[in-house]
Image (cartoon, grey):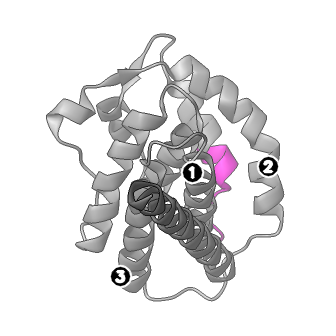
Amino acid sequence: MAPAPTSELLEELVAKAPDGPVDLEWLLSHLDKRSFGLLLLLLGLLVIIPGIATIATIALLFPAVEMMLGRTAPSFPRFLSKRQFDFKRFKRFTVRARPLLQAIESVSRPRWNARHEVTNRLVGLVVFLLALSAGWPLPLVNVIPGMAVVLIAIAYLQEDGLLLIVGLAAALICLLGLGWTLWASAGAVIGWIRH
């Protein structure tokens, strides 16, 4: 049986949210058995949104590490799980993002599914690196890693190995691009100091 569409899972979760701010503990308590995938999707979307991006980027590191360690469910330290954020902004963003999610889902289906444990650890490692790259204090540097995390999360939720390979390739390009930018910037600063 094919997994439920990611956009539907997201819509159900958003519908359950209260009108005021929510915290990560509330999100965790409302995730289903595919909690890692849905959590990565939510945090990936939050990483793209200005004003929420910093806390979402930090939060993304924790499930990524737990996936690398082979844990079965995500958790957060209390200082992070009780940190509230404005869910109304997220609700508005999901309405705008829905057509894109549905477009990705329309070409996605379960295929080329690797062993779950291997997939978990690989996704965890790549998401961890993307979260680190999204944390650099450069303008709009969070958007591309956030989009890569969203793509990987959809592939993971849809159990689509082919889409996962596309997502991982996008992540690699993103990480290489950031690496080159930092290398070129460091070279320029060293050159400026020497003169």
Kindly indicate whether the residue at mark 1 contacts the one at mark 2 (C-beta within 8 angstroms): no
Q: Secondary structure at mark 2?
A: helix
Label 1 to label 3: alpha-carbon separation: 23 Å
Q: Give the residue at x 66% y 70%.
A: 2
Question: What residue would you read off at disc 3?
Answer: 117
Q: Give the residue at x 18% y 31%.
A: 79
Does 8 appear in magenta?
yes
Q: Give the residue at x 79% y 49%.
A: 100
Which one is closest to the eye, mark 2 or mark 1? Answer: 1
Instruction: Please report whichever mark, 2 or 3, sits nearer to the chain's N-terminal start.
Output: 2
Classify 10 Å Cα crowding around label 3: few (below 14), some (14-19), many (20 and above). Answer: some
Quadrant in the rendering for residue 92: top right
Kindly indicate whether the residue at mark 3 contacts the one at mark 1 (C-beta within 8 angstroms): no
The amino acid on which the numbered mark 3 sits, given as a three-letter code, is: Glu
Label 2 to label 3: alpha-carbon separation: 29 Å
The amino acid on which the numbered mark 1 sits, given as a three-letter code, is: Gly
Does 31 appear in magenta?
no
Whether residue 33 is visible: no
